[in-house]
Image (tube, grey):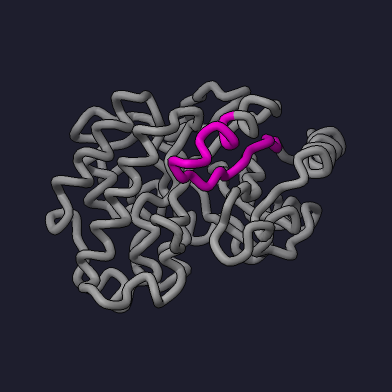
């Protein structure tokens, strides 16, 4: 079975989930392993403290379950870092100052606004809003490199006025290719985030066209995560993933240990 390497607990500002409940859900799903990746989004707009992380408390709890659950489930220590160019040094210190196995870099804030909120899309077309989101990923990649996988690179389509109704790779090919090529040059993984199915998109984030294009361009590092914020969201629609990724050209995926990739068969 697969690993789920993107999940959140009560250490994240948007989850009340308890670690033992997440672990039990993973065991019920027959997962080979999990990685906790609680949020650290410094300077989050409107509520700057919402996604700060008590690193000591978080790491201590993960370590305790690594010890007690080692015979049932492999557990890794990770983090999801919200990237913004002006907080690069703060993010670097957070990542390098702690013994993480896996670091997801994600774009949750675009020039001071989270695309989760409807006002991000006001006064312009949906395409313009999506293009700004993708361009902001390039800005983040140019500013920061101390992560292992880029999370849900088309996160914005979860929340747009028409979500992914008018969205496809071809419409944004130029900027998406720039992102994928930069990830490959930087030796970074592309995350396949199955929360896209949970949000009713009918596809993961990113969609299959982008995953295929990443492979076509030479990308081979691929992580899988459900982005669960509750036990029932662990391994969301993972039954679809092996066939989906094989159709995109992949025969393996990646998990990280001590920031080093390990390839596992699909």
Q: Is residue 234 left or right of residue 131?
A: right
Residue 250 lies, in percent from the top left, at: 31, 36
Question: Which of 265 and 206 lies nearest the eye of the viewer?
Answer: 206
The quarter in which the N terminus is drawn is top right
> Which stretch appears magenta?
74-92
Residue 237 lies, in percent from the top left, at: 48, 60
Residue 148 lies, in percent from the top left, at: 48, 31
- Residue drawn 25% across the image and 48% down it: 210
- Residue drawn 40% across the image and 77% down it: 118
Question: Which of 203 and 164 lies nearest the eye of the viewer?
Answer: 164
Q: How many marks?
A: 0
The quarter in which the C terminus is drawn is top left
Residue 139 lies, in percent from the top left, at: 33, 41
Q: Is residue 211 visible?
A: yes
Q: Quadrant of residue 191?
A: top left
Q: Is residue 117 left or right of residue 52?
A: left
Q: Quadrant of residue 90?
A: top right
Tell whether position 76 is magenta: yes
Q: Is residue 1 visible?
A: no
């Amino acid at each position: 079975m697969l690993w789920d390497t993107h999940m959140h607990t009560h250490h994240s500002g948007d989850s009340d989930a308890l670690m033992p409940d997440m672990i039990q859900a993973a065991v019920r799903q027959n997962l080979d392993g999990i990685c906790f990746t609680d949020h650290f989004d410094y300077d989050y707009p409107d509520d700057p403290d919402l996604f700060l992380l008590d690193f000591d408390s978080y790491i201590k709890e993960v370590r305790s379950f690594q010890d007690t659950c080692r015979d049932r489930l492999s557990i890794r220590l990770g983090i999801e870092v919200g990237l913004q160019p002006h907080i690069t040094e703060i993010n670097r210190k957070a990542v390098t100052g702690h013994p993480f196995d896996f670091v997801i870099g994600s774009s949750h804030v675009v020039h001071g606004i989270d695309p989760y909120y409807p006002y991000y899309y006001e006064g312009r077309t949906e395409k313009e809003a999506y293009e700004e989101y993708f361009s902001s990923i390039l800005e983040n990649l140019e500013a920061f490199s101390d992560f292992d996988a880029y999370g849900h690179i088309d996160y914005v389509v979860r929340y747009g006025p028409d979500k992914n109704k008018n969205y496809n790779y071809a419409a944004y090919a130029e900027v998406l290719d720039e992102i994928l090529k930069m990830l490959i040059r930087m030796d970074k993984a592309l995350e396949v985030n199955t929360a896209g199915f949970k949000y009713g998109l009918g596809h993961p984030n990113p969609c299959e066209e982008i995953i295929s294009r990443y492979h076509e361009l030479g990308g081979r590092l691929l992580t899988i995560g459900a982005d669960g914020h509750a036990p029932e969201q662990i391994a969301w629609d993972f039954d679809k993933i092996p066939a989906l990724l094989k159709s995109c050209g992949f025969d393996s995926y990646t998990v990280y240990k001590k920031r080093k990739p390990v390839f596992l068969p699909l």
